[in-house]
Amino acid sequence: MTPVDAAFATTGTEDPAASALFAPVRLGDLALANRIVMAPMTRGRAGPGDVPGDLVALHYAQRASAGLIVTEGVQPTAEGKGYWRTPGIWNEAQQAGWALVADAVHAAGGRIVMQLMHCGRVVVPANRGYAADVVAPSALACPDLVPGPDGTPQPCAMPRALAASELPGIVAEYAEAARRARAAGIDGVELHAASGYLINQFLNPASNRRDDDYGGSPERRARFPLEVLAAMADAVGPGRVGVRISPGNPYNGMAADDPEANFAPFLHGVEQLGLAYVHVVDMALPGFDILAWLRRHGRRPLIANNNLDRSSAAAAIASGRADAVSFGRAFIANPDLPARLAARAPLARPDRRGFYVGEDRGYTDYPVMQP
C-alpha cells in the first residue's frame, strides 16, 4: 500500500473532499490516478548546457504521487531562454537529461508532461550564457524586472519584432521540442500560453501591435498561437497536448482588461484541435467567472490553478467546475502532498530563499510526512 493509499484509507470514502480529489480521471490520452496535479514552477536547477541532471530527476520523482506532474517551463529553442538555469529541449544532451527525469518519475509510478515555454521578450541576456536574439511580436520591452544570475532583478532587453516569415520556423521548433519530449519518454507536452511569455505576447494587445495577419484583431492575434498548438498536436497527437492560459493576469506587462474578447478566438481554436486539457490560472477577477466561461466555450477537460486549498480544490471538482486541480508552492515543501491532503495533515511551508537558486537545499531536502 502506497502512502497515499494508506492516508486515503484513514479518511474513508464518506469524505466528499477526499473522494473528489482522489477519483481517477482521463485527460485525453493521459490516465491520472488522482486529480491532484503538480503545477509548473521555474526552479533554476538545470546543469551546464541547460541539461536537467540527477538532482532534477530526484526532485520530480519525489513528487510522483501527483496524478500528473507538469514540469517547469522548458525552452524549445535557444532564443526561448529568459531565466537563469532553466532547462531546454532543443538538443540531444537536453533530451537525454529529460529521459533520466521521465524514467525516474515512471519508476516511482507517476505521469509527467513537459511545459514548453518560450520567454519571448521576457529576457535578461546574462541569464543565457550564450548569444541569441531577443524576439517578440512587436519591438516593445517587457516593463517588469526579471532576476539575473545572482537573483537581483534587472530590466529586460529590448526585443526585435519577429518577421512573419520567421514564424513558421518557430512553429517547427515547438513541434520538434514536442517530439523530443516524447522521445525522452515524457508523457505529453503543455504549451505555456500564460504569464506574459511569447504565446501570451501574441494574444495580448499590450505586447502585440502588429498590423499584419498576426496582429490587430483578437482572431489574428490568435493565429500564431493556434499554429503552434496545431503543430504540437500533429507531432505527438492532440491527446497528449495541453495548454495553460491566464486570462486577466497582468504579469510581465500584459493588459488585464477584457480577457473574454482577447481569449475567445483562441479558445474556439483550441476546442477544434481536441486537446487533452486546458490548464487555467483562475485570477478571480471581479464579475468574471473564468471556469464557468471556459465551460461555456468548450468540452476540453479543465485543470484549475491558483491559491487553492484542500477544501476549495475538492469543491471545484465535486461541482464540475474543474476536472483536476493543480498546486504549485504546496508541492515545493510537500513532496508527498496527495498523502497529506488525504490525511488532512498540516502542510509544510516552503522557504522562498530556495525557489530559484541553489542545489538540493530547498529543492530535494523537504521531508515526507511521518507515519
Image: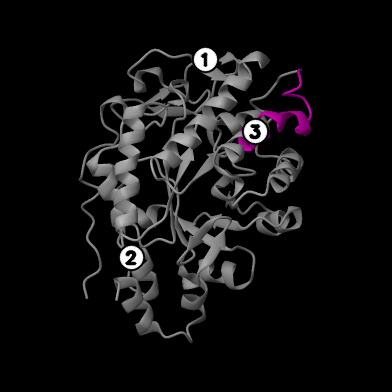
**Residue 190 lies within the magenta run:** no
**Residue 226 lies within the magenta run:** yes
Q: Amino acid at mark 2?
A: Leu
Per the image, label 1 sits on a secondary structure element best described as: loop
User: In terms of sequence position, does the residue under pointer 1 or pointer 2 come before the other?
Assistant: 1
State the residue in front, 106 or 158. 106
- Residue at point 52%, 74% (across, down): 20
**208, above or below 367, in the image:** above
User: What is the distance, in whole Å, between disc 2 and disc 3 at their CAs?
Assistant: 37 Å
Tag on residue 237? Answer: none
Of the two numbered discs 1 and 3 in the rendering, the one whose residue sits closer to the viewer: 3
Q: Amino acid at mark 3?
A: Pro
Category of crowding for the residue at label 3, using alpha-carbon neighbours closer than 10 angstroms: few (below 14), some (14–19), many (at least 20): many
User: Residue 219 at x, y = what percent?
Assistant: 77, 33
Per the image, label 2 sits on a secondary structure element best described as: loop
Which quadrant of the rendered structure holds the N terminus? bottom left
Q: Amino acid at mark 1?
A: Met
- Residue at point 43%, 21% (across, down): 78
What predominant SS class does the magenta segment belong to? helix
Q: Residue under circle 1?
A: 158
Which quadrant of the rendered structure holds the C terminus? bottom left
Q: How is the image coloured?
A: one colour
Category of crowding for the residue at label 1, using alpha-carbon neighbours closer than 10 angstroms: few (below 14), some (14–19), many (at least 20): some
User: What is the distance, in whole Å, between disc 1 and disc 2 at their CAs?
Assistant: 41 Å
Q: Residue under circle 2?
A: 347
Image: magenta residue range: 212-230
User: In terms of sequence position, does the residue under pointer 1 or pointer 3 come before the other?
Assistant: 1
Q: Residue under circle 3?
A: 225
Asked whether the viewer can see residue 151, the reply is yes
Category of crowding for the residue at label 2, using alpha-carbon neighbours closer than 10 angstroms: few (below 14), some (14–19), many (at least 20): some
